[in-house]
Amino acid sequence: MSAVRLAVDENVNPLVPTWAEIILVVVIFAVLVYIFAKFISPMFEKAFSERRDAIEGGIARAEAAQLEAARTLEQYQHQLAEARGEAAQIRENARAEAQRIVEELRSQAQEESARIVARGEEQLANQRGQIVRELRGEIGTLAVELSEKIVGQRLADDAQVRATVDAFIAGLDASDSRSSASGTGASV
C-alpha cells in the first residue's frame, strides 16, 4: 500500500490544498474574525474614540482657552484704558490743586505784604507825628528863647509864652498842611 499511496501522492500537487485543509482554514479564519470583531475591534474603537475625544476635546479646550484669553486681554486693555484715564484725571486734579495752592499762597503773600506795608506806614506815621511833636516843642522853646533875645527881656508870663508858642505852631501847621495839600510836602 505504500506504493499505491506513493503513486496516489505523486498525482497530488503540493501547492493545491485539499478540501479538508480549506474547510479547516476557513473555520479558523472565521473564529479569528469573530474574536477580532468581538474583542479586539471594540478595544481599537474605544482607543480611537478616546483619542478622537481627546483631540476634539483638546481642540475645544484650546478654542475655549483662546476665547478666554481674548476676553481677558480685552478686559485688561479696558482696565488699562480706565487706569490711564484715572491717572490723567489724578494728574489734572494734582495740577489744579497745585495751581490753587500757588494762587492761595500768592494771595496770602500779597495780603501779608500789604499788611506789613500798612503796619510800616502806620509806624512811620506814628514816628513822624512823634518827631513832629518833639520838634514843635523844641521849636517853641527855641522861639521863646529867640524872642527873649530879640526883645531883650525875659518872658516870664507863662500865658504869654504859651500864646506865642501856640501862634508859632499854628503857623507851622498851616504851612505844613499847605505843603501837604500841594503834594510837595517835605518830610521832616
Image: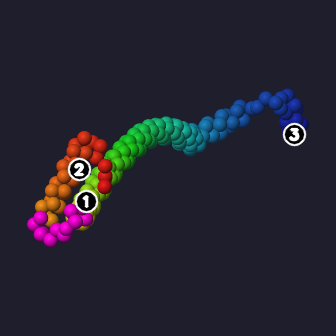
- Earlier sequence position, callout 2 versus callout 1: 1
Task: Give the Cα distance between marks 2 and 1.
Answer: 11 Å
CA gap, disc 3 and disc 2: 179 Å
Percent across and percent down for residue 135 are 26, 62
**Element class at badge 1:** helix
Check residue 2 in the rendering and tell me which mark sits there, or answer none: 3
The residue at 19%/57% (across/down) is: 169
Comes first in the chain, label 1 or label 3: 3
The residue sitting at the left extreme is 159
Amino acid type, callout 1 = Val
Which quarter of the rendering shows the N terminus?
A: top right
Please tell me whether mark 3 sits on a helix, a strand or a loop: helix
Q: Which residue is mark 1?
A: 132
Q: Are marks 2 and 1 in contact (CB under 8 Å)?
A: yes
Query: What span is in magenta?
Result: 148-160
Q: Is residue 129 above or below residue 8?
A: below
Name the residue located 65 percent from the left edge and 37 percent from the top edge: 29
Residue at the far front: name it.
Answer: 152
Left or right side of 82 for 133: left
Which percent across, then down, holds residue 178?
21, 45
Image x and y of residue 102, in percent:
36, 48
Indicate the amino acid at tag 3.
Ser
Is 158 part of what is drawn in magenta?
A: yes
Q: Residues within 10 Å of mark 2 (few under 14, many from 20)?
A: some
